[in-house]
Amino acid sequence: MSDQTPAAPASASGTPPADEHRRVEAAAATEGDTRSSFGRFMSSSAGRNFGLVIALLVLCAVGVATAGDRFASTDNMLTILRLAASVGVVSIGMTFVIIGGGIDLSVGAIVALASVWATTLATQRMAEDTHWIIMVFTALAVGVGCGLVNGVLIAYGGMAPFIVTLAMLAAARGLAEIISERRTQIIEVRPLIDFVNGDFLGVPVLVWIFAVVSAIGWVLLNRTTFGRRTIAVGGNATAARLAGIAVKRHTMMLYALLGLACGLAAVMLMARTTTGSSTHGFLWELDAIAAVVIGGTLLSGGRGTIVGTIFGVLIFMTLTNVFTLNNLDSSTQAVAKGAIIVIAVLLQQRVAARSDSS
């Protein structure tokens, strides 16, 4: 008498039953994914965020070991968060653009132009006569305007994002120098400075702004049609268009959204430095792109998380703080940051290759 399990009977039409389908699919999944459970976890979104937390803790340990109480003090932690806030807001906007398959090299120049335009004598006089919110609206309008120009040229002009935003980088920085005559413009409207530099529940308002922007960004990306369309456009623009998504209009909106983030970051930077200057935001495009890439967003588009970008910003700013406390010059810092970006991209390609093969 045989002890083999009898095969499930096929239906009259020759189609295998549902149980047989599930058994074959489970066997195929087991054969196809030969990674360990730890490997599968680290390839998931939660695993990548876990790796970022470990990296941040290691950096903090290095900071404590090399700078002692100067790094571990509450004041230094708040300093890191304040510095991370402005770049963090830009990085949230950059996350959307990169997930959507684009890139923007002009964010630092847009921040500079928005800060200069919002601190001209005419704008400040109008703000003193009415309300300081006028300066905020001016900075936001300049940011959105620059973002729209980028978006229209890229989406409807068919130009490469790299070329368009590189041109905007030069043009916006030059226009900021013309408007300010290469001079630093001091902000005389104290209510704006007092509000943005104030505290709420013991936490700086700058940090609160970053937290609110991050929360809005997370909801927008993960809980709205706009976010799902962004991932679809970045993953496969042709398939997204065939699915009925207005790819060109959506791409334009992504750049406008990043411009809005640049305008808000300009307001935060203006209040923190009490000035508007054409030198504001210098190399911010490097910091923002690095934070997004470190956070796990693919440069090719179609995948990324807001939580990862937040960790990326914190890692990058903590690293800068450790360098500064150990008296490393800015040139060494720039070399180290460039190396980190290259390493992060190489790791991304390795993870993407593993995902494709499995």
Image (cartoon, helix red, strand yellow):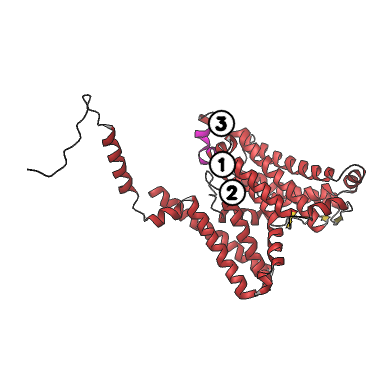
Mark in the foreground, 3 or 1 = 1
Q: Is residue 306 above or below residue 12?
A: below
Which image quadrant is residue 161 in? top right
Residue at mark 3: 245
Residue at mark 2: 306
- Residue 166 place in picture, x, y as percent: 67, 49
Mark 2 or 1 closer to N-term? 1
319 relative to 348 in the view: left or right = right
Compute the Cα span from label 2 to label 1: 9 Å
Residue at the front extreme, as displayed:
201
Q: Is residue 157 magenta?
A: no
Compute the Cα span from label 3 to label 1: 17 Å
Of 206 and 326, the residue lying toward us: 206
Under circle 3, the secondary element is loop
Q: Is residue 237 magenta?
A: yes
Answer yes or no: is residue 348 visible: no
